Amino acid sequence: MLVKEGTPVSPGIVIAEAVVLGLDEQRVPLRQIGRGEVDTELRRLDRAVAQAGREIEEEIGNLAAGFELPRQILGVHRDMIRDPALRAAVEKTVRGDHLSAESALARVMEGYYRRFEEMDSNYIAERSLDLRDIERRIVGILIGKRHGGAPQVAKPSVIIARNLAPGETATLDREKVLAFAIDVGGRTSHTAILARALQIPAVVGLETISGAVRTGDLVIVDGYRGKVIVQPDKKTVEEYRSRAVSHRQHYQLLLKEIPFPTETVDGYELAVAANIELPEEIHSAVEWGAAGIGLYRSEFLFDGADLDEEKHYRTYRGALKTLRDRFMVVRTMDLGGDKLPGGSRASEVNPFLGCRAIRLSLEQPDLFKAQVRAILRASAHGTVRLMLPMVSNLDELRSARDLIRQVEDDLRRRGIEFDPEVKVGIMVEVPSVALMADQFAREVDFFSIGTNDLIQYALAVDRVNERVGHLYQPTHPAILRLIRMVIDAGKRNRIDVSCCGEMVSEPIYAILFMGLGLRSFSVSPIAIPTLKRAFRQISMKEAVDIAQTCMQFESARESRRYLESRLAYCIPGDS
């Protein structure tokens, strides 16, 4: 029995035989051409691009009704294929280096891959997987190798592969493909987002799973814990069969409860919104019952080029249309200082403590103002809030607000419509802000607590460093005190306080925060129904009692054990 651990991206438990897909590597030989062949190669390129676009249009047309998210993602791929900038870059390479169309395309795409993968952002780096799918489509046509389309599976099975392209995932036969497990990817890849939307259990980032399984092997895919078990023993199979039944029943219950109000048993109303990285996730957030978008990470719109204001504006406006009357909080760019917009690099010993987020925005005010302008223009179409990341002192906040006022004045002069009452808030993710929460609360409209970085900076722990990972403790007494300070300051100054950190995706922590006084939460879309159900099972009085008890402990371990024992009924994945 072999157990492999990766990243869980879509919940569920499946026990079935595996179908292992070949790597299907597509090697593009370097082929030089003569000067007289340039125009011929460009015509080949244009025909291939047109055919690839038609193939995607056909795939979109074949999707069943109600598959809005897969339709949107395939539409993104179609638009990327037809992007004039990509066409211009390939033409330049064909003419300048005298390369064939496929060789030039491969060279251009390799440059894109490097820039995307070097960026200090998982959800930007993962866009390289979309680019690889696009390259595979066009090159396949150019060299006469047909694009594979959806994997063909003869009977209900688990797909094992190095990777599944988003286009392949969108058209999977859900009757035959019960789950999938792949070597690459993360939570924000399009393949992962599609798995959640299609409700196919999936684990990604397994690194070597494609080489560890053979077709016909019995495998267990645990989409809750991120485990894949190859050739499990009888005891393990029986254990997972029992868990699978329990989880299916729990999932069906959650689906029925999505329309239910979010309030405690003693009538206290709460708000649960969604954190998203990509516009394609908004549809899922609405389906899962989100009150709005509590954190819209805008970094995916930065693709190594200077900020495209119109692209930002169209994206925000489209999101508001999907949300209808729900609110949307857009966080301004939170790019790291080691990778700047425009493709330039600034070498920093520790980029996480360097010129990133609001510091980068203030260093490049024209870039910041362009994004603010797009956000404000979109505010004419719905309820938008603007949020500043990584603020650490009042001077930064005041400088940013001054730039925002400049943009507002410019829009008024030009007669461009926007909501003059757009709320401006900050992420509370640096200890200095938590300690001065009252002062900040007098100058902003809302706080959003970012627990991921707050814990990391307060405890001096790199949460992705395996050697010190055990020191990353969400219930450390110092963290709880900082969070309570922020919530109390918000109450005193009558501003909204929310939490958008991954910590509150776990019901035991969310209930703890509720007991500390928090009433607004923002989590991954798929976590919303579970969190709402946990809130409906407890009274505010009990939550306050739990929080008061936790505040008396002197270690994170004591708090965690107490929460797990007191709230065992709302810990998902362990039934």
Image (cartoon, helix red, strand yellow):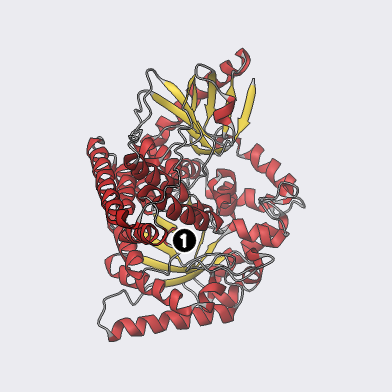
- Mark 1 lies on a secondary structure that is helix
**x then y, percent, for residue 10:** 47, 37
Local crowd size for mark 1, using a 10 Å CA cut-off: few (<14), some (14–19), many (≥20): some
* Residue 144 seen in the figure: yes
In front: 439, or 147? 147
Q: Quadrant of residue 257?
A: top left
Q: Is residue 488 left or right of residue 253?
A: right
- Name the image quarter holding the N terminus: top right
Residue 247: image x %, image y %? 49, 28
Q: Is residue 200 left or right of residue 78?
A: right
How far across and how far down the image is residue 54, in percent? 23, 43
From the image, which quarter does the C terminus lie in? top right
Image side of residue 145 versus residue 524, left or right? left
Residue receiving disc 1? 299
- Image point 52% across, 46% down: which residue? 539
Quadrant assignment, res 346: bottom right
Which residue is at 68% across, 65% downward? Answer: 350
Q: Residue furthest top?
A: 234
Name the residue located 44 percent from the left edge and 58 percent from the top edge: 300
Count all numbered tags in the image, as a single digit: 1
**Vertical placement of 56 versus 342: above or below?**
above
x then y, percent, for residue 417: 26, 76
Res. 259 visible in picture? no
Viewer-proximal residue among 319 and 477:
319
Q: What amino acid is at disc 1?
A: Glu
| The residue positioned farthest toward the right in the image shown | 554
